[in-house]
Amino acid sequence: MKITGAVLLLALALCCFYADAAGQAGKGFCSEYKKPPEACTRELNYICGTDGKTYDNKCLFCQAVFEYLGSLCFEHYGECKSQDEAKERGDL
């Protein structure tokens, strides 16, 4: 019984760890902003969102995250390949 409890506890800990990592790649990506950024720089450091849109930088992406009430998530750094990326995931 103790072994089963230990395995269950370990599994729960791993789930929490991976859930946090997934959150950092998604909605947690903008956790440094407590409210929508008011002004963003013009730097180009492209970010692809799960909506299939390329944002010029993290600040502009995070503005959109607040605008969409958190339903928009980080997909990857760099330009989005196309809107087909979002369609394949069922986001559009």
Image: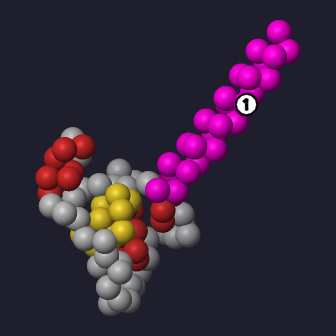
Q: Amino acid at mark 1?
A: Leu
Q: Main secondary structure of the magenta part?
A: helix
Q: Residue visible at 54% across and 63% down?
A: 31
Numbered circles on residues, count: 1
Residue pictured at 79% horizontal, 23% vertical? 6
Magenta span includes 41: no
Q: Could you tell me if residue 44 is visible in this image?
A: yes
Pinpoint residue 73: horizontal percent, then vertical percent.
Answer: 37, 55
Q: Quadrant of residue 2?
A: top right
Position of residue 82 measured from the top left corner of the image (x, y, whole percent) = 15, 61
- Is 22 magenta? The answer is yes
Residue 44 locus on image (x, y percent) = 32, 85
Viewport quadrant of the N terminus? top right
- Residue at 63% across, 44% down: 17
- Which residue position holds label 1? 10
Give the residues drawn in magenta, as a range: 1-25
- Position of 28 with respect to 45 (left or right) is right
How far from the left and from the top, in percent, is residue 32?
55, 69
In the rendered view, tell whether residue 41 sits above or below residue 18: below
Q: Is residue 86 above or below residue 62?
A: above
At 16% across and 47% down in the image, what residue appears? Answer: 87
User: The residue tagged with tag 1: helix, strand or loop?
Assistant: helix
Residue 68 visible in the picture: no
